[in-house]
Amino acid sequence: MPPVNTLFWDNGGVILTNGWDRGSRKAAVEKFHLDWVDFEDRHELMLHAFECGQASLDDYLRRTVFYRDRPFTTEDFKRFMFDQSQAFPEPLEFLGQLAGARRYMLATLNNESLEINDYRIHKFHLRDYFEAFFSSCYLGVRKPDRGIYSLALKITQRNPEECVLIDDRSLNLECARELGMHTIQFKNLAQLRDDLSQLGITADGR
């Protein structure tokens, strides 16, 4: 079996907080005094288009929040959405060590809407770590759909056994594993280091 040379990373739940998850949406409902059931129903109807790059952030907000007059602005709500993104310093530092070793191709493989994804790339300087960004908003397909993993393999011209996918959600790992990729479900940094070392991947140059 060839050695692993390519690491695909999920972002939310691994190196960053999630961009716009259920907890963030609940916080928005409380802050802006929205109706949770109505907002969540509209969110679910818009989610696929939003994360696959078919609906802009303005489109999403027009359908989920600003379909009626509000006592706050679209910019107020966007600012709140962007502010939900925070870094996990220790996993991000470890990722930086792997990037600095220059022994592996590092790329994202994540579900995210276009504007939030672009914000996170720039805010957390993710171009310093990753060589490519296989995000649902760019590829038009979301995890756990098999197509997103196949596209990442085709574009990088990697064989599945050369790759590992790191994700915090087990469902997102299933199709990747079926394609022949190594998979690691992220729980904490110590566990990630250990699981990667078992595949021969370290950041210390040995």
Image (spheres, rainbow, N blue to C red):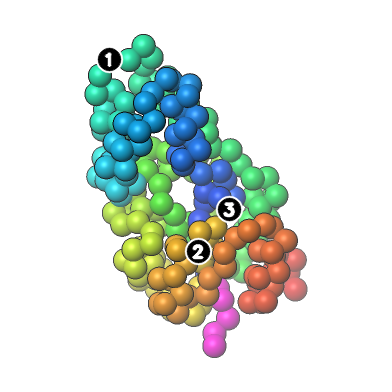
Q: In the figure, is residue 129 to the left or right of 159?
A: right
Q: Residues within 10 Å of mark 1 (few under 14, many from 20)?
A: few
Classified by dominant secondary structure, the portion drawn in magenta counts as: loop
Which percent across, then down, holds residue 119?
A: 46, 37
**Residue type at tag 2:** Ser
> Mark 1: which secondary structure?
loop
> Mark 2: which secondary structure?
loop
On residue 14, which mark appears? 3
Q: Which residues are magenta?
A: 1-5
Q: Residues within 10 Å of mark 2 (few under 14, many from 20)?
A: few
Q: Residue at x 27, y 42 (%)?
A: 45
Q: In the figure, is residue 141 to the left or right of 178?
A: left
Q: Examine the image and state in which quarter residue 146 appears.
A: bottom left
From the image, tell me which residue sits under label 2. Answer: 170
Which percent across, then down, holds residue 134?
A: 41, 57
**Residue type at tag 3:** Val
Which percent across, then down, holds residue 198?
A: 67, 76
**Residue type at tag 1:** Asp
Q: CA distance from mark 1 to mark 2?
A: 40 Å
Q: Is residue 33 magenta?
A: no
Whether 90 is drawn above or below 145: the answer is above
Q: Residue at x 46, y 40 (%)?
A: 22
Q: CA distance from mark 3 to mark 2?
A: 13 Å
Task: Tell me which numbered mark, 1 or 2, is placed earlier along the sequence.
Answer: 1
On residue 69, which mark appears? 1
